[in-house]
Image (spheres, helix red, strand yellow):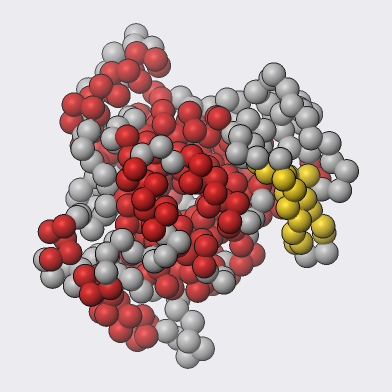
């Protein structure tokens, strides 16, 4: 076990890191373990929960991860499915007089400023279910997905809907949660086993936040695999969500990008995910620059779908390693073109956890948190005015 020192404001902290657990203490905070993995609303903090002195800093980074994902998503929607050159030109036009890029929404995709896309809607659906139930309840998640489908959701290609028989999946009131989970997992294997869409990456953030205060990080991995198998059972999808959730959790506990990157590498089990993580040290995108610039013209998309999770994962980890600020990392991500919504959302989750919520431009946070949109009426899960209290519940009030 190795100790790493860093500073936040005037407070000195110690990051204590091992491959099986990443925990943080402040000054003389004791680090202990417990067989119990439950925390109740009225109990004092049990010994499997991080000691109270560190918690304000954990909250700042956990909130940064969630709101960072939302801001990246909302900013990126204006530029999605376009070439890098086209996006860069549009971004220059969109800057305000101080050369800041605001969240402007998209008239092409009928996105008002502050609205998020389907990936982050899926993220918020899972976050709300975890908060509401206090644990992973498959029946509640399925019910939430049904509400989502019936709310006229954004996007036309959604692997979550494709994997499930959503009209009949939970029609039997006698079916147990375990039986329902097995039924849905089998359905996904039959219908969606080859999907490598980046949609699955969206749920890593609430999973990382909800398991961050548990000293045993195996809960992050097991929960990530369990939920990913419901819709995208390909081994690389399960691996990618597990790796991403582990990295976000690492950053919430200790905002060192090198540590988080090593955690990701050590957690990777498939060659697909490992290769993209290793390539992230050298370049932001899996394909040569001339092919990135041709995205949308045919040659790029003929090789791999634009929403391929490997692209999103590599872009996000590259910017985790090399970005000097949240703003610069998000701008650089969007400038690559392609699926700018998902790419900026996942990059935003990592950078929000690394730099903390205070590093995210206030104008961006205000735009997504204060927006009052028609979409919020049909699917209120994505109304973000309570984002801070939601993160607080995910951190401290869940019982796994």
Instruction: Give the image quarter of residue 315.
Output: bottom left
- Does residue 244 appear left or right of residue 169 in this picture? right
Give the residue at x 37% y 46%.
Answer: 273
> Is residue 133 visible to us here?
yes
Instruction: Give the image quarter of residue 189.
Output: top left
Judging depth in this view, the residue of 272 and 43 nearest the camera is 272
Q: Position of residue 63 (x, y in %)?
A: 59, 52
Q: Is residue 388 above or below residue 185?
A: below
Judging depth in this view, the residue of 44 and 27 nearest the camera is 27
> Is residue 366 visible to us here?
no
Q: Position of residue 83 (x, y in %)?
A: 24, 73
- The quadrant of the picture occupied by the N terminus is top right
Q: Residue furthest bottom?
A: 97
Q: Is residue 221 above or below residue 57?
A: above
Instruction: Give the image quarter of residue 46.
Output: top right
- Does residue 395 appear left or right of residue 303 in this picture? right
Q: Position of residue 364 (x, y in %)?
A: 51, 68
Give the residue at x 44% y 41%.
Answer: 268
Q: Count the marks: how many?
A: 0
- The quadrant of the picture occupied by the C terminus is top right
């Amino acid at each position: 076990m190795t100790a790493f020192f860093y500073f936040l404001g005037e407070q000195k902290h110690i990051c204590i890191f091992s491959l099986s657990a990443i925990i943080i203490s402040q000054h003389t905070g004791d680090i202990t373990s417990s067989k119990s993995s439950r925390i109740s609303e009225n109990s004092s903090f049990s010994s499997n929960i991080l000691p109270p002195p560190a918690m304000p800093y954990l909250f700042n980074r956990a909130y940064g991860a969630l709101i960072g994902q939302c801001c990246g998503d909302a900013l990126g929607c204006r530029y999605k499915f376009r070439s890098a050159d086209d996006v860069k030109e549009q971004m220059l036009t969109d800057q305000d007089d101080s050369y800041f890029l605001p969240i402007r929404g998209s008239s092409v995709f009928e996105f008002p400023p502050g609205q998020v896309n389907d990936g982050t809607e899926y993220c918020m659906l899972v976050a709300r279910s975890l908060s509401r139930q206090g644990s992973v309840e498959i029946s509640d998640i399925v019910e939430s997905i049904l509400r989502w489908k019936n709310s006229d959701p954004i996007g036309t290609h959604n692997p979550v809907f494709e994997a499930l028989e959503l009209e009949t999946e939970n029609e039997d009131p006698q079916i147990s949660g375990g039986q329902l989970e097995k039924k849905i997992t089998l359905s996904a294997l039959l219908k969606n086993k080859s999907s490598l869409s980046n949609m699955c990456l969206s749920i890593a953030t609430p999973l990382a936040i909800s398991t961050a205060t548990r000293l045993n990080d195996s809960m992050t991995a097991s929960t990530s695999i369990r939920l990913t198998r419901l819709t995208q059972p390909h081994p690389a999808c399960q691996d990618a969500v597990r790796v991403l959730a582990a990295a976000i959790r690492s950053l919430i506990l200790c905002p060192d990008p090198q540590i988080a990157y090593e955690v990701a590498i050590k957690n990777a089990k498939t060659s697909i995910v490992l290769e993209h993580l290793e390539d992230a040290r050298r370049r932001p995108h899996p394909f040569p620059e001339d092919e990135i610039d041709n995205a949308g013209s045919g040659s790029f998309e003929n090789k791999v779908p634009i929403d391929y999770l490997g692209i999103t994962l590599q872009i996000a980890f590259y910017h985790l390693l090399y970005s000097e600020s949240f703003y610069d990392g998000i701008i650089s991500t969007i400038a690559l073109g392609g699926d700018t919504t998902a790419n900026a959302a996942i990059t935003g989750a990592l950078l929000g956890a690394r730099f903390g919520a205070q590093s995210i431009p206030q104008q961006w946070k205000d735009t997504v948190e204060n927006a009052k949109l028609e979409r919020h009426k049909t699917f209120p899960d994505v109304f973000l005015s309570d984002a801070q209290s939601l993160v607080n519940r995910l951190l401290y009030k869940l019982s796994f």
